[in-house]
Amino acid sequence: MHMIRKTENIAILTLVHQRDKALVNMLNGIAAGSIWPHEVLIICMNEQPLVLDIKYPFSIRSIVLQTDTGLNLGAARNLAMKESSVNYNVFLDVDCIPDKYFLETYYNQLESNSDVLYTGRVRYLPAAFDEKENWTNRLEEISAPDPVRQEIKNYPYELFWSLNFGCSKDVFSKIGGFDMQYLGYGAEDTDFAFQARHNGIALQTIDALAFHQYHASYQPPLNHLESICRNANRFFSKWQFWPMQGWIDAFEKAGYVKKADDHLEIRSLPSDEDILAALKH
């Protein structure tokens, strides 16, 4: 039974691909928030919408985006913003569970100044977090801060990420939306931030907190090596700056890629065993 909360003129937009359990946890978190969104808009990438067993106190709309070239995150986010029926929009990664005051924090900031690109903060939940007793009320306690960003009051454009950000439709349009030439994993969100800076849009970090649900990941992400290199080349051609420098250096050190002045060349691909060895524990 949900307590009745005020529904504000703001939407949460999310992208989904094989994340059914995470999506339900996210929706439950939204329902427990201090305010409710006008709607949650779900872009289902190359899959059909999840049939939800739970009735939520806000509108949920699912749109299927089929792409022949793998996952196009930029196209999915652009579609979400285009289809949203309200001016204020928050993009929340499907792996994230919002804090109780997450949406209210965004709403208040956008009401006070809607000409800014806002990004929130993220803490990380451990493996099997949802097996802990009363976990939904202990997210802060059982999570860890972001090791890169925890001490940074206002993230620079280089550290913008798409897990947790919000803006008005007008700001999104002024930025130019996401560059749809980026395919698969890597760099499309840094490119979005660089476009924001190029177009004179301020980036402000706010205390809209989300908790990232654990899933297997790799360090370095050898499972995404091809798309990271392809997208890094695209990024460098636009900005004369290498994104994802740490990962590229790791790939180069291991002999998978060779970096020239203006181009990354893949020399060999990692084996399944190499990828497994990079799994974070």
Image (tube, rainbow, N blue to C red):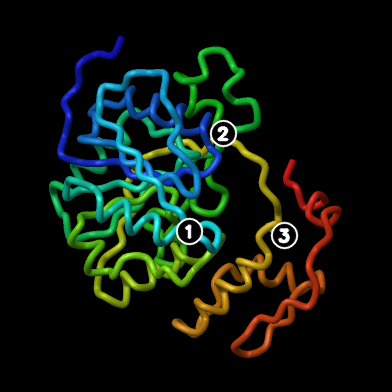
Which mark lies nearer to you, 1 or 2? 1
Numbered label attached to residue 67: 1
Give the amino acid at mark 3.
Answer: Leu
Mark 3, residue position: 222
Q: Quadrant of the N terminus?
A: top left
Give the amino acid at mark 2.
Answer: Leu
- Estimate how packed mark 2 is, as few (under 14), some (14 to 19) or many (20 or more) residues with alpha carbons within 10 Å: many
Mark 2, residue position: 125
Residue 272 lies in what quarter of the image? bottom right
Depth check: give the residue in front, 163 or 120: 163
Give me the C-alpha separation between circle 1 and circle 2.
31 Å
Which mark lies nearer to you, 3 or 2? 3
- Estimate how packed mark 3 is, as few (under 14), some (14 to 19) or many (20 or more) residues with alpha carbons within 10 Å: many
Give me the C-alpha separation between circle 3 and circle 1.
23 Å
The spot of residue 262 in percent (x, y) is 59, 88
Helix, strand or loop status at disc 2: loop
Asked if residue 121 shows in the view, the reply is no
Q: Earlier in the sequence, mark 3 or mark 1?
A: 1
Name the residue rendered at 43%, 54% in the picture: 162
